[in-house]
Image (cartoon, helix red, strand yellow):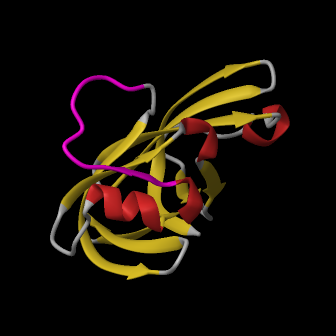
């Protein structure tokens, strides 16, 4: 599981859906939390959180241009690749934080990803989870 420490910047609630903007590593991320009305009712801007997202939910792009609907775009540098027969583990550096992406080996080969490459890691807002951290 990928983890980034951060804090809540803003929350927009409607019924049982919350759209939460959180800042981690000086970048804004968006998490769409469904069915969390009671849980997020006490959340406030400034509250410390950990952003969580699964390795298999991290898509990669090289030379991405134009607009896309994915809310979370992380400019990263590839630090390592472990290619398996079907799946590849791509280790990324995002502003000093390690982020892992699990993609098909076919995709890794099609992108011709090698250590040192600049890529964008892409995570849909509904794949991002936030866990509140104890406040000091």
Residue drawn at (79%, 37%), measured in percent from left and top?
36
Q: How many marks?
A: 0
Q: Is residue 67 magenta?
A: yes
Q: Is residue 14 above or below residue 128?
A: above
Give the magenta-colored segment's residue range: 58-68
Residue drawn at (35%, 78%), measured in percent from left and top?
81
Q: Does residue 31 show up?
A: no
Rendered-image quadrant of the C terminus? bottom right
Residue drawn at (73%, 26%), measured in percent from left and top?
17
Q: Does residue 86 show up?
A: yes
Q: Is residue 70 magenta?
A: no
In the displayed structure, does residue 111 sit left or right of residue 32?
left
Rendered-image quadrant of the N terminus? bottom right
**x, y percentage for residue 98?**
37, 73
Residue drawn at (29%, 56%), measured in percent from left and top?
111
Q: Nearer the viewer, residue 43 or 68?
A: 68
Q: Nearer the viewer, residue 87 or 14?
A: 87
Q: Is residue 37 above or below residue 63?
A: above
Majority secondary structure in the magenta region: loop
Q: Quadrant of residue 119?
A: bottom left
Q: Quadrant of residue 6?
A: bottom left
Q: Nearer the viewer, residue 136 or 47?
A: 47
In the displayed structure, does residue 18 sit left or right of residue 105?
right
**x, y percentage for residue 46?**
47, 44
In the displayed structure, does residue 101 sit left or right of residue 25?
right
**x, y percentage for residue 35?**
83, 34
**x, y percentage for residue 50?**
54, 60
């Amino acid at each position: 599981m990928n983890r980034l420490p951060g804090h809540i910047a803003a929350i927009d609630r409607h019924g049982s859906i919350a759209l939460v903007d959180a800042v981690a590593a000086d970048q804004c991320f968006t998490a769409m939390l469904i069915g969390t009305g009671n849980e997020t009712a006490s959340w406030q801007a400034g509250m410390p959180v950990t952003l969580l997202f699964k390795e298999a939910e991290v898509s990669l792009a090289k030379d991405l241009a134009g607009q896309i609907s994915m809310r979370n775009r992380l400019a990263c540098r590839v630090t390592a690749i472990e290619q398996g027969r079907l799946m590849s583990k791509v280790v990324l550096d995002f502003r000093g934080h390690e982020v892992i992406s699990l993609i098909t080996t076919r995709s890794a080969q099609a992108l011709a990803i090698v250590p040192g490459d600049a890529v964008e890691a892409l995570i849909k807002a509904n794949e991002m989870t936030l866990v509140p951290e104890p406040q000091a």
